[in-house]
Image: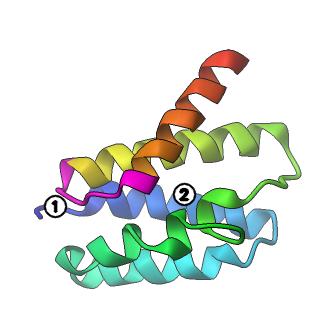
């Protein structure tokens, strides 16, 4: 794994949306971003984890946003996150599957 800056940037933007909408998943995303700032090679397991891509309560599963634009931006950021993960060699079939669904949803809204 090389430069983690794209991952950190995406994670910080996800965190900001989650905090603006009072979602507790912001704390997990912030923790992963902080770890990446110290050692980007250490975040693979956290990014591919159930806390990110698992079931109810996972980061991807957040569904309530104050602004419609936040929801669309959140989905776009999750897709970008999965692309950045793949670029860094971080594999997660669950993440890739969800990103595909988000991409389809976003296309249907445009």
Whole-angstrom CA distance, mark 1 to mark 2, is: 18 Å
Task: Check the picture and name the quadrant holding the C terminus.
Answer: top right
What is the number of callouts on the image?
2
Q: Nearer the viewer, residue 56 or 14?
A: 56
The crowding category of the residue bearing disc 1, from other C-alpha atoms within 10 Å (few below 14, some 14 to 19, many at least 20), is: few
Q: Residue at the right extreme?
A: 66
**Looking at this view, is 88 or 18 the one in front?**
88
Question: Which residue is at a point 64% across and 41% down the rendered structure image?
Answer: 73
Magenta segment, principal secondary structure? loop
Compared with 35, 82 (above or below) is: above
The stretch in magenta equals 87-94
Q: Which residue is mark 1?
A: 3
Q: Is residue 26 above or below residue 107?
A: below
Q: Earlier in the sequence, mark 1 or mark 2?
A: 1
Provide the secondary structure element on which disc 2 rests.
helix
**Residue 13 image label:** 2
Q: Residues within 10 Å of mark 2 (few under 14, many from 20)?
A: some
What residue is rendered at 55% in x and 80% in y?
A: 28
Can residue 58 be found in the magenta stretch?
A: no
Quarter assignment of residue 19: bottom right
* 86 left or right of 96 in image: left
Instruction: From the top left corner, tell me how far across and down residue 50 is, in percent.
Output: 50, 73
């Amino acid at each position: 794994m090389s430069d983690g800056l794209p991952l950190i940037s995406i994670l910080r933007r996800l965190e900001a949306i989650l905090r603006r909408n009072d979602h507790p998943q912001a704390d997990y995303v912030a923790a992963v971003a902080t770890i990446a700032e110290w050692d980007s090679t250490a975040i693979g397991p956290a990014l591919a984890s159930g806390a990110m891509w698992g079931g109810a309560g996972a980061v991807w599963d957040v569904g309530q946003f104050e602004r419609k634009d936040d929801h669309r931006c959140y989905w776009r950021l999750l897709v970008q996150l999965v692309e950045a993960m793949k670029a860094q060699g971080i594999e997660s079939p669950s993440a890739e599957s969800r990103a595909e669904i988000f991409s389809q949803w976003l296309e249907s809204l445009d």
